[in-house]
Amino acid sequence: MRIQPARKLRGRVRVPGDKSISHRAAIIAALAATGGRSRLTNYATSADCAATLTCLDALGVTVRRAAGDALEIEGSGVRLSHAPRAPLDCGNSGTTMRLLAGLLAGQSFTSTLTGDASLRSRPMRRIVEPLLLMGARVMSEGGRAPLRVEGRSPLNAIRYALPVASAQVKSCVLFAGLNAGGRTEVVEARGATRDHTERLLTLFGADVHTELKDYEGRPAVPFVSLETPVGLRARDCNIAGDISSAAFFAAAAALVPGSDVTLAEVGLNPTRTGLLDVLRRLGADVSVTDERTESGEERGELRVRGHDGGLAPVSANANVLGGELIANVIDELPILCVLGTQVEGGLEIRDAAELRVKETDRIAAMVKNLRALGAEVEEYADGLGVRGRTPLRGARLESFGDHRIAMACTVAALIAEGESELEGAEAVAVSFPEFFTLLESVTER
Ligand code: S3P
């Protein structure tokens, strides 16, 4: 794909439904008591979320496309009756694999989860370990997929302290907990992560509670507990727009002077809005209006304007991102690296080694692409540092098959001088198939 620089970005965009929420809403709707029909609107258009629906279908769950963009899902209870006939293909989607593994661990049948080459290279020991403790048998290939899950019912209820700050691992244990006897507890010992699973389980009627307690010398550590038996009831759920998709438009608007972009109905769950704090700290003009909560999730209208003076930090230490903030902005770090090249004082990202085990090694991918664009970048084991206020020039860029790398590179190409070429642009479909069309609709050249 060839990308020309932008003069400015102006207009209003409605990004598709949130990917993280969509996966969970579909799975939880499928687990509602038999006969209950849930209606999901604004379900993500992403290939990842389609993979979740395909897997649910293979597990005997009825998923119907209804009028408009609605999906209707028939609940079949937390005990699935249908052993899949073939391995469940999760495609590129780590969330599909890790969440379904938790659910499958508590079934009375054996199933296999697999995925594409990227997903089969990602770490799965992080979910295998707690599922073994709960009494399931899970076989992996040296800690990687395919995963063969020999379910056990009921599972043992455990208290599990997360060794990595991962919402996928937390959710895996909670989904397994639906079929455990008693109280399952997850301690977010490495910091809080997105809490969509907890909110949706609560919306559908489960007994889920989060308490903040001291843990091993750290204050305010979330302890998430789930009690069984769980009676999930079918619900209608309107899924908020994906802030991680909106992030590319927000960053582009902040980067290009004279831009003014409004993003309608964007999810504003505080476990996901670190991006807005970072943008503001780096001097961007960000405002939120029409805030409201629906289906258990905050949402509102986000407006970002690019001003002539460029980006400059408004507080001390604003140029360093690290610690507990990282889990909140984990998917936004590639685009924040691009932003960092234009901020006075640059940007340093630390404590983000998790980026190395995403759909690709996102640290290595961004270092390579930013250097090709003429940025000055230092690579660390757990992050990277970019020098600020550096003019970028058009280059050959590569997505490495990773949707967020493709989109971050596209925004970088908009602010570069001259044309860029992006290889593997089609990867955007994994989370945001409409990305290029929507971006063109607000870009002036
Ligand atoms: C997700 C959690 C994050 C994130 C991913 C979606 C989720 O992954 O990067 O895009 O929906 O739970 P980890 O849990 O591995 O950090």
Image: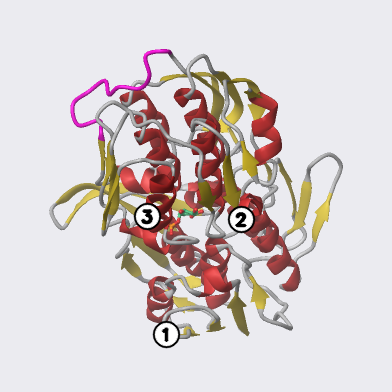
Q: For the point 45% across and 25% down, which residue is it? A: 255
Is 351 in front, or is 427?
A: 427
Residue 2, percent from left and from top:
64, 42
Q: CA distance from mark 3 to mark 2?
A: 17 Å
Is 7 in front, or is 188?
A: 7
Q: Nearer the viewer, mark 1 or mark 3?
A: 3
Q: Which residues are magenta?
A: 308-319
In screen coordinates, is 164 left or right of 229? left
Query: Could you say which quadrant of the image residue 285 lies in?
Result: top left
| Amino acid residing under circle 3 | Ile
Name which of mark 1 and mark 3 comes first in the sequence: 1
Q: CA distance from mark 1 to mark 2?
A: 29 Å
Image quadrant containing the C terminus: top right
| Disc 1 target residue | 142
| Amino acid residing under circle 2 | Gly
Residue 299, percent from left and from top:
55, 30
Q: Nearer the viewer, mark 3 or mark 2?
A: 2
| Amino acid residing under circle 1 | Gly
Name which of mark 1 and mark 2 comes first in the sequence: 1
| Disc 3 target residue | 363
Is 323 in front, or is 202?
A: 323
Tag of residue 424: 2
Q: For the point 32% across and 63% down, which residue is it? A: 162
Q: CA distance from mark 1 to mark 3?
A: 24 Å
Tell me whether circle 1 and circle 2 mark residues in contact (CB < 8 Å): no
Principal SS element in the magenta part? Answer: loop
Residue 321, percent from left and from top:
27, 40
